[in-house]
Amino acid sequence: MTDSTSEASGNPFLRKLERFVPLSDEDRVVLLKVSENAQAVPARTDLVQEGDPPAGVFLILEGFACRYKLRANGARQIMAYLVPGDAGDFDVALLDAMDHSISTLSDCTVVRIAPETIRDLLARPAVAAALRKSTLVDEATLREWLLNVGRRTAVERLAHLFCELHLRLSAVGRTDEYRFKLPLTQPDLADTTGMTSVHLNRSLMELRRQGLIELQQRHLTILDLPRLRELAEFKAGYLHLGDQAAA
Amino acid sequence: MTDSTSEASGNPFLRKLERFVPLSDEDRVVLLKVSENAQAVPARTDLVQEGDPPAGVFLILEGFACRYKLRANGARQIMAYLVPGDAGDFDVALLDAMDHSISTLSDCTVVRIAPETIRDLLARPAVAAALRKSTLVDEATLREWLLNVGRRTAVERLAHLFCELHLRLSAVGRTDEYRFKLPLTQPDLADTTGMTSVHLNRSLMELRRQGLIELQQRHLTILDLPRLRELAEFKAGYLHLGDQAAA
DNA sequence: CGCAGCGTTGATTCGGTTCAAATAAAGTGG
DNA sequence: CCACTTTATTTGAACCGAATCAACGCTGCG
C-alpha cells in the first residue's frame, strides 16, 4: 500500500472537499476509498442522459466532462465543466428524471458512486457539509456563467472562463503555475460561451494578439494573469476558495 | 384564528414544498408558522448585498424579487426570480460571504427566516428533503436560463421566460388561467434575458404582433400557450413539477 | 408642477453569425 | 502503416440580429 498522505494529496476529490471543511482522518479514509473503482472513459461519451432516472453520481478524477443540453436544431449549450474533483449533485436521487445530460469532453478517469455509498458519505457531518458547500459553489458558478454570457463581450467571456479554470484547476493541483491542460476543442469552448466556433476562434486570436494567453497542443498558458483578470473583470469570490485564491 | 386548511392552501411556501414531498400535519404547522412575521418591503430594495456575510434567508410571500449581479460599468444581470414561495438557499450559512445580491423588483411581502428557525426546519426530514429538492430545481432553472441566453434568439428567450413563469406561478396559485401579475419593467426583463431594453421592447412587440401574448397594466395574458411553448421550445421537465405541469 | 424613469419608435452602427473554402490534425479501417 | 474520412482550425466576405444613440410622449411621484 502506498503512503496514504501522498495518495491523499493527489486525490482531487479529497483535496477539493478539504479546502471547504476540515476533515477527520476517518473522513479522509472513507473519501479515498470512494476513488477506488475508477474507470477510464473515452472522450465524447455520455455518462448520464437527459430523461434518465438518476442512478448514483459520477465523480471525475481525471479529464474534463460537462453538463449540457441540446436544442432541437442541434445547438448545444454547455452549462458546467466537471474537472478533477468535481461530481454530480449528491442529492440528485430526489429527482425523478435528469433534466440535462453529462458527457466527457476528453478522455476521463471517473468513478460511479452508488446510492448506498452516497448515503454513507452524507451520514458524515463534515463530509455532508463539504458536499453541500460544493453544491452552493456549483450554483454560484452557474450564476457567474449566466452573467458571462448575458453581459460580457465574446473576448471578455473567454478571458473570464480561462481565469476561472486557472483557479479551479490550481485548487486541485492540476496547474503548473500559469499553464494547464485544456483538452477542449474550439467548438466545445464556443458551446460553453454561447457563440459560434468561428467567432470563438477570432476571440481566441484576439487574446493571443494581446499577449494574454498561449494555447497549443491542448495546453493553455496564461501569459499575463493580472491583465487577463482585469479584462474579464474577474472576481474570485464566487468560487469560495478563501483568500489564497486571489494570489 | 382562520381555518387552517384555507390558510395552508394560500401559503405559497407550503404549497410549493408540498408539491415536492408529502408532509405531515406537524410539518405543515411548523412551515405555516414561519410565515408569521411577514413584512412589507417596497420595490427596488436590496434584501441581501454581495459581500455580506449570510444572515438567515428571505422567503417571498408576495411580489417578485431577484438575484442579480452588477458589472463595474453598471450592467446588471438578473440570475433568478424569486416569486411567492421561493426563498434563498437554506444552506447559505456554510459560506463566508454572499456572491450576489438579492433585491425586490416589485413591492413584496417577505419573511426573514432566522438561522435557528432554519435549523429547526432542516431537522425535519420531509421538510429538509423538500428544501433540497427545491435547491436542485433552482439549479436546473439556472441551467435553463443559461441555455436561454446562450442559445436562443431574443424572441425565443422572452417566450421561454413567460412559459416558465406561467408554470411556476400556477404551481403556487398565482395565476388566473392564462393571466398573471407580472410586476416587472422592460428594463428588468431586459436584464433577465441579456439584452437591451430597446431590443426587449421590440421582441415584446413581436410576440404581441404574433398574437401570442398581451401585456398591459403589469398583467401578462398568454393568448396561445401551445404556440408560445412551441416557439420557445419549452419543455417543463427542469421545473420538476410532475406530469400535471404539462397541461 | 417638474423631474425621473418607462415605453415606444427611428436611424445608424457593430458584434457576431453565416456561408464558404482551404489547411491541418485526428481518428478508422484495411 | 497507409489511405480515407471526419473533425478541428483558420481566414475571408456578406449579412443580420442586437446595441447604440436619439427623440418624444407618458406615467407616477415628491
Image (spheres, coloured by chain):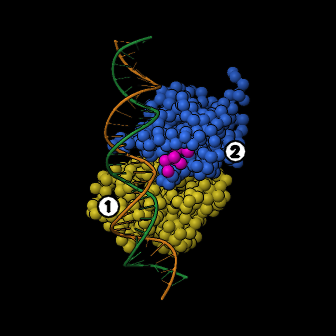
Chain colours: A blue, B yellow, C orange, D green
Q: Tell me residue A136's x, y (percent).
A: 58, 49
Q: Is residue A51 above or below residue B41?
A: above
Residue on which the image places disc 2: A247
SS assignment at label 2: loop
Task: Work out how far the residue at label 1 is from the one at label 2, CA to CA, in angstroms.
Answer: 48 Å
Q: Main secondary structure of the magenta part?
A: helix
Q: Amino acid at mark 2?
A: Ala
Mark 1 residue crowding within 10 angstroms, few (<14) / some (14–19) / many (20+): some
Q: Quadrant of residue B10?
A: bottom left
Q: Amino acid at mark 1?
A: Leu
Q: Is residue A186 visible?
A: yes
Q: Is residue B65 above or below residue B143?
A: below
Mark 1 falls within which chain? B
Front-lying residue, B27 or A112? A112
| Range shown magenta | A153-159
Front-lying residue, C26 or A2? C26
Mark 2 residue crowding within 10 angstroms, few (<14) / some (14–19) / many (20+): few
Query: At 56% across and 45% down in the image, what residue appears?
Result: A159
